[in-house]
Amino acid sequence: MAGFCVILSGRFQDDRDDASVWAPIIADFELDEANFAQQVLAAMPLIIRQNLDELAAEQLAEKLHAYGVGARVEPDDAELAYFEREGSIRGPVPLSALRKFIRSQELYRLRSEQDWKVWQDKTAFDDALFCKIPSPHTLELDDSDLSEEGSMPKIIWRKPIA
């Protein structure tokens, strides 16, 4: 039975925030290059693959590490969580792994709920896990069409109203 996911957490080899660093990953994983920064980079950490067996998850994480990208293997949870940082919504990540990514006093919400809560845990997390994407944009989640079990919400990229 599949029970693991891979969380893309960011680059860790250098400090460049250049889209060209991600070009091989975009090509290899057949991702939409036009929306990659908005839907992936600004939402990290986020699950990129779910329902894998442990070996497949470890192999995928190793492949991403070979590209110089931070990736973590975590057990799949039935409950996913999102959190807000620097004006954008991050995730989803399994609820059991949230403490590894969220800072104390940041807002979070469960996928199954609409209300945001304040994270009270003082657990230390590693800033080096994150790729910092400076942007005046924000991300919103549209989870109105989650009819299929395990379906992921659509991420909507919005420019703030000036």
Image (spheres, rainbow, N blue to C red):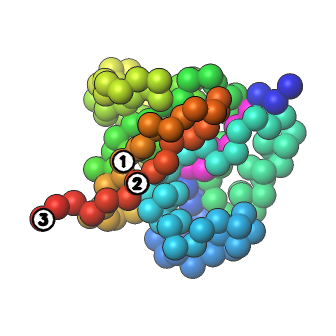
Give the distance between the C-alpha atoms of the residues marked 3 and 2, in whole angstroms. 18 Å
Sequence-wise first label, 3 or 1: 1
Residue 140 — which label? 1
Residue range of the region highlighted in magenta in the rendering? 4-9
Does 48 sit left or right of 125 as displayed? right
Q: Position of residue 108 (x, y in %)?
A: 37, 30
- What main secondary structure does the magenta stretch of the protein show? strand
Numbered label attached to residue 162: 3
> Quadrant of the image for the C terminus?
bottom left
Labelled pair 2, 1 in contact (Cβ < 8 Å): yes
Type of amino acid at the residue the image marks with label 3: Ala
Q: Is residue 127 left or right of residue 107?
A: right
| Residue 156 position in % (x across, y down) | 40, 54
Q: Amino acid at mark 2?
A: Ile
The image quadrant of residue 26 is: bottom right
Q: Is residue 108 left or right of residue 1?
A: left
Crowding near the residue tagged with mark 2, few <14, some 14–19, many ≥20 C-alpha atoms within 10 Å: few
- Between 47 and 71, which is closer to the camera in this rendering? 47
